[in-house]
Amino acid sequence: MNCPKCGAELAQKFYKGMFEIDACPHCRGMWLDANELDKLEDRVFDEDAQKGSLIHFQKETQTLCPHCAKPMLEFQYRLYDLKLEYCAENAHGFWLDAGEEEKVIEAMRMRAQTVRRKTSAEGEWKQTLKNMHAFLKRSSKKK
Ligand SMILES: [Zn+2]
Ligand SMILES: [Zn+2]
C-alpha cells in the first residue's frame, strides 16, 4: 500500500505495542483499519455507548483510499475540532495525518473525564434523594 498523501510506501509498524498499523515513513501519517480506530480509542475510553457518533459533516476529498483507490471522505471526528478521512465506499478504514492519533487519544481522555464527572454527580444526587426520602419517612412516622 502507498501513502494516500505523499505516495511513499507504507510500512507496517506496531503502534505502541497494541496493534499493527501501516505508517508512512515520509509524512508520518497512518492508516487504521476499520476496527483499529476503535481499538485506539478504547485504550483510554472503552464505553462505546458514551463516545458519541463518530462521523459528522462529511465531505469528499481528493485523497484516495490506499486499499481501493476510491476517493475518501473527510469528516469531523465526534464533533471535536479534528478532521479525519475514511473510505466510505468499502469501509476499509481511516487515514490519520501525523499527530492526529494523539488528538484522538486526547479527545477520548477528555470524554472519559466528562463521563466520570457526570456519573459521580448523578451518584451524589441519588444519595441526596435517598437521604431526603429517609428523612421524610422518619418525620411522617413521628406524627
Ligand atoms: Zn506519506
Ligand atoms: Zn477503500
Image (spheres, rainbow, N blue to C red):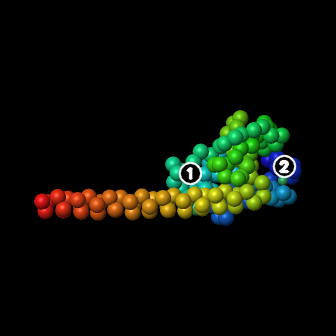
Residue in the picture at 82% in, 42% down: 63
Q: Is residue 74 left or right of residue 109?
A: right
Q: Mark 2 CB in 8 Å range of ligand 1?
A: yes
Q: Residue at x 12, y 59 (%)?
A: 143
Determine crowd level at label 2: few under 14, some 14-19, many 20+ residues with C-alpha closer than 10 A: some
Q: Dot 1 lies on which element?
A: loop
Residue at the image position 44 percent from the left and 61 percent from the top? 121
Secondary structure of residue under mark 2 = loop
Name the spot of residue 135 as percent of width and height, x first: 24, 63
Question: Which residue type carries mark 1?
Answer: Lys
**Dot 2 amino acid type:** Lys
Location of residue 48 with respect to 109 vertically, above or below: above
- Disc count in the image? 2
Quadrant assignment, res 108: bottom right
Q: Is residue 92 visible?
A: no
Q: Is residue 19 left or right of residue 141?
A: right
